[in-house]
Image (tube, rainbow, N blue to C red):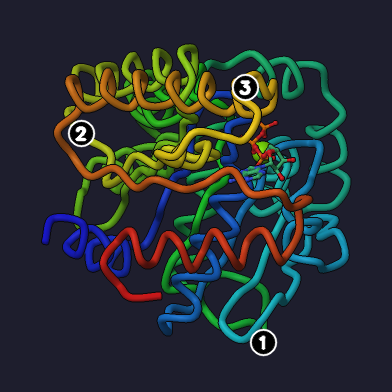
Amino acid sequence: MRTNTTLTRLLGLELIVVTGKGGVGKSSISAVLGRLLSDAGRQTLLVEVDPRENLHHLLDVPPSGGKMVEVAPRLRVQHLLPRTILDDLVREKLKVGPLVKRVLASPIHQHFTEAAPGLKEAAVFGRCLRLLEGHGPRGVPKPDVVILDAPATGHGASWLGAAQLVSDVISSGPIGHMASLVAEFLADPDRSGVVVVTTGEEMPVQETLEFLEKMETRLHRRPELVIANALYPEVPEEAPEDPEDPLFDLWVHRRAINEEELDRLAREWDGPVAHLPLLPLDPGPALVGRLGRRLKTELGGGA
Ligand SMILES: Nc1ncnc2c1ncn2[C@@H]1O[C@H](COP(=O)(O)OP(=O)(O)OP(=O)(O)O)[C@@H](O)[C@H]1O
Ligand SMILES: [Mg+2]
């Protein structure tokens, strides 16, 4: 019942931030959510900010190179660099070519945009908000929802708090205005939400628990969903033919760690959790498809 509500909630949001420790499957889950929401009828844009651009591999489309790339009906992917967004902001506000060039080349602008805490992060959310308001490229449908494949949780809470930080420091001008709109948007549970990805291993679960606490204390928010990804399958009850089979031992051992860590997570987090299996598949559409079907079942939406 509770998980069914989670699916309904995810389907009603305008922005979903996907975060988690490095390497746990954030990009894979972002792609899975992209498929799930677009299949359910939502015009969906997947946004990636990692300079190592890799969502296109998972979806089997050409690299975005900063443009929106169509993946399927109602699903697009875009790679955004925070630096480019900030430069675009200067272009848009100054409009006069030579002046824009001088500002963009000036060490003050470069130093400020690199060093100002939270500015680049707030700018990414600002861009998402503008796209949601229909200020995207001509001829491309306005997204109903943006899924942000965000950096690892180590930075996740600071990402989510960045706009508030900027808006506290800069209260006027285009940047201050953008930051306060973004901070308001990220504080609104009817519009934006967070999905945290972990594996059933000690360090990722530890980082997840720390992230949940930071979200609660700093942002007064809880994620919509925690996804425990890449779990070893349950061990069958009957003993193997060879009782010393090392592969069987490995399986039993890894599964036991998964169960221990899932229990630890359950003791600290009473919100929705979805379990996804470790699949013997390379990154790509087949992995995304199978994880997607499983997630739908986990969320009570049928296979
Ligand atoms: N459930 C799964 N079964 C099998 N392989 C998986 C699963 N989930 C993720 N992977 C694989 O694990 C690797 C890391 O996944 P992914 O790139 O999605 O993680 P990430 O959290 O985005 O990493 P990074 O922090 O580097 O951005 C990839 O090779 C991906 O194909
Ligand atoms: Mg990634």
Per the image, the residue denoted by label 1 is 139
- On the image, the x and y values in percent for residue 61 come to 82, 68
- Of the numbered discs in the image, which one, if any, rests on residue 221? 2
Mark 1 Cα within 10 Å, few/some/many (few <14, many 20+)?
few
In the rendered view, tell whether residue 104 sits above or below residue 41.
Answer: above
Quarter of the displayed picture in which ligand 2 can be seen: top right
Residue at position x 71%, y 75% in the image: 71
Residue at position x 72%, y 77% in the image: 70
In the rendered view, tell whether residue 42 sits above or below residue 202.
Answer: below
Kindly indicate the quadrant of the structure image that contains residue 1. bottom left
Residue at position x 56%, y 26% in the image: 152
- On the image, the x and y values in percent for residue 227 come to 40, 42
Please name which of the two marks, 2 or 1, marks the residue nearer to the observer.
2
Q: Is mark 3 on a helix, strand or loop?
A: helix
- Of the numbered discs in the image, which one, if any, rests on residue 250? 3
Q: Distance between the residues labelled 2 and 1?
A: 36 Å
- On the image, the x and y values in percent for residue 108 come to 74, 17
